[in-house]
Image (cartoon, rainbow, N blue to C red):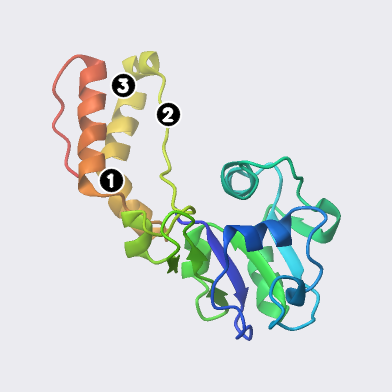
Amino acid sequence: DGLSIVLNKNNTFVDKLTIDDLKKIYLAPGARTWKEINAAWPDEEIKVYSPGQDSGTYDYFFGDVVNKDDKGQPRNEEITFSEDDNTMVDGVALEEYAIGFFGCSYYFENTDRLKAVPIVDPATENAVEPTPETIESGEYAPFSRPLFIYVKVKSLESPAMKEFTEFYLSNAGKLSQKKGYVALPDEIYEAAYERYANRLGGTHYLTP
């Protein structure tokens, strides 16, 4: 998945954002206007959207990236939270000075309504837009992230769970693409197949 930071289509002044910019927008006390982020930008109030606090996307954005090394807190009173990503899509699409974030699948489904802003990678200082290619390669950093399922080994004694797991390992790449996510490189799936076989104490030939 590539966590995408999105703006209204009519936002022509933001061409990239840094992690520090996102801290100013999403953490208390927070910037109230775009001009507080960059003096060349409009003195217009930022309408801030976020997934709900029970969301893994919320946890990754705040816990692993934006607030990873700080003690700041999200500016909850000024953020519009929603458990429904489509609600956030509509909110940003209708508010000229809005900003929001969610998984890349919702951005890819709404490129006609939203603009994804390139994010500056703190390690390389390159501003990179979320695309299937930059997400797969990890170039879209720090917002590219692998997604996993975790299976209790003992549960694989159940034929149904074993069949499901093998189906997942064989089809995760191509089916994830159909749902708007990005397939991992082939070598990652091969490593997963090998680990699965080793945990079962045998060899299992699966089709990527």
Question: For mark 3, does the 10 Å Cα neighbourhood hold few (<14), some (14 to 19), or many (20 or more) residues?
Answer: few
Q: Which amino acid does label 1 sit on?
A: Asn
CA gap, disc 1 to disc 3?
A: 18 Å
Q: Nearer the viewer, mark 1 or mark 3?
A: 1
Pinpoint residue 100: horizontal percent, then vertical percent: 65, 64
Total labels drawn? 3
State the image coordinates of residue 28 (x, y, percent, origin top left): 80, 53
Badge 1 is on which residue? Answer: 171
Looking at the rendered structure, the kind of residue marked 2 is Tyr
Q: Residue at x 32, y 39 (%)?
A: 168
Q: Do the residues labelled 1 and 3 touch (CB within 8 Å)?
A: no
Q: Residue at x 64, y 47 (%)?
A: 62
- Residue 85 visible (yes or no): no
Q: Residue 150 carries which label?
A: 2
Q: Label 3 amino acid? A: Pro
The image shows residue 28, relative to residue 25, as above or below, that is above
Answer with left or right where residue 102 lies relative to residue 48.
Answer: left
Q: How far apart are marks 3 and 2 (CA)?
A: 17 Å
Q: Which of marks 1 and 2 is nearer the N terminus?
A: 2
- Nearest to the eye among marks 1 and 2: give it: 2
Q: What element carries label 3?
A: helix
Mark 3 or 2: in front is: 2
Label 1 – label 2 distance at C-alpha:
16 Å
Question: Residue visible at 34% across and 32% down?
Answer: 164
Q: In which quarter of the image is residue 22?
A: bottom right
* Left or right, residue 201 beside residue 6: left
Q: Earlier in the sequence, mark 1 or mark 3?
A: 3
Provide the secondary structure element on which disc 2 rests: loop
Q: In the rendering, which numbered label is found on residue 159? A: 3
